[in-house]
Image (spheres, rainbow, N blue to C red):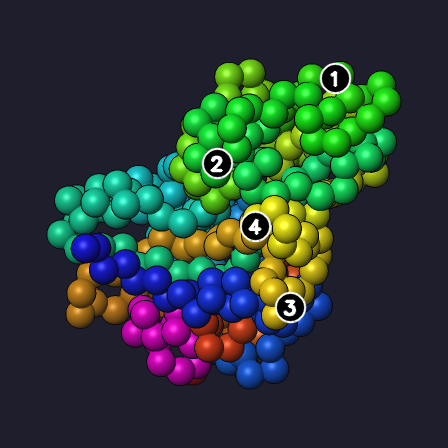
Amino acid sequence: MLKFVWSTLAACAVALAGIPALAEDYIDPQLPKYRAINKLEGKLTLVGSQTMSEVVALWEDRFTSFYPDVDVEVVVKGASNAVPAVISGEANIGLLSRETLIEEVEEFKKAKGYEPKILTPSLERIAVYVNESNPIESLTLAQLDAIFSKTLKRGEPKEITTWGALGASGSLADQMITLKGRSDTTGSQVFFKSIAMNGGEFRAGISAEKDNLALVKAIRDDKNAIGFAGQMWQINGIKPVSLSWKAGETAYTVDSVGDENGTYPLVRPLQFVINQAPDKDLGPIEVEFLRYVFSDMGQEDVVKAGFHPISAEPAKTALGAVGLQTLN
């Protein structure tokens, strides 16, 4: 069995428990404090997810205010290129907006002889959006699976193709559901397939919008549409539906904190992929960048970008995974 360096296993447990680390305005006061060093120069390259580039832009801005002689380059090539870019040396850090796939870890290990370090600096809730005129207020994961999937791994007896099958009445009842999505290699598409569809296969006919903004605009402009994107992408003309793990269980809104019954189902880790050989130290720029990201300042940037911060223990675990036990 592969021994992943899941430095934010605690962060994901926090997410599932629904405690305040997922509250949008919550910055854990126990997060490490960042203190800049006197001098740093060179280049840092991050390659991969478009979603993660949103928060990386804020990290870059404040980090380079401390270190104006550091050039931070962010190359948006999609989550599927995060691991290959680190393997090839194109990137110091890969940006992966989902969990790492086993085959990606195997590819890395074959090339390097050891596994990558996987760190999670933030979390994102994926909302399921419909047109604001749609009367549907909540769905189960099994219903989502039957709407988007042809394999029905969550137990629904047949595909759901009309809004009437979900309880809509009137003129919407007989309308075919229009499926909006992204390309098969984007992090959100892979994550949704894994969690909502239990690893199943998408139905034919789902659109492949070029980016999240195009996707939510397509839902706004189509009364029969449904799609999924990060919570930060809500715009006028669409609405998120509440989700429950199973029929009869509590349905949670995308901005809920959670309670003793559970929490919102679609929470994904946004991850760093790092090449660190055993018994080798990271370069000084990588060290300082990671110290910044996993500090109170770095997590403030996460909130400003519209994502969810991690709490102190996962942050300290992440730093420890790359040999950084304390801040400077």
Structural distance between the alpha carbons of marks 4 and 1 = 26 Å
Distance CA(mark 2)–CA(mark 4): 13 Å
Looking at the image, can residue 175 be seen?
A: yes
- Numbered badge on residue 245: 4
Q: Residues under labels 1 and 2: Cα distance?
A: 24 Å
Would residue 154 be found to the left or right of residue 297 on screen? left
Give the mark nearest the N terminus, 4 or 1: 1
Residue that badge 1 annotates: 175
95 versus 167 height, above or below: below
Q: For the residues carrying marks 2 and 4, which lies nearer the camera in this image?
A: 2
Q: Of label 1 and label 2, which has the lower sequence position?
A: 2
Is label 4 in contact with label 1 (beta carbons under 8 Å)? no
Residue indicated by mark 3:
259
Q: If you read the primary sequence from the N terminus, does the residue marked by circle 1 or circle 3 appear first?
A: 1
Q: Amino acid at mark 2?
A: Gly
Q: Amino acid at mark 4?
A: Trp
Badge 2: few (under 14), some or many (20 or more) residues near its Cα, within 10 Å? few
Give the percent coordinates (x, y) of residue 293: 50, 66
Question: Which badge, 2 or 4, is on the more N-terminal residue?
Answer: 2
Residues packed near mark 4 inside 10 Å, few (<14), some (14 to 19) or many (20 plus): some
Q: Which residues are magenta?
A: 316-327
Q: Earlier in the sequence, mark 3 or mark 4?
A: 4
The front one of 262 and 302 is 262
Dot 4: what SS?
Answer: loop
Q: What amino acid type should be assigned to the residue bearing mark 3?
A: Asp
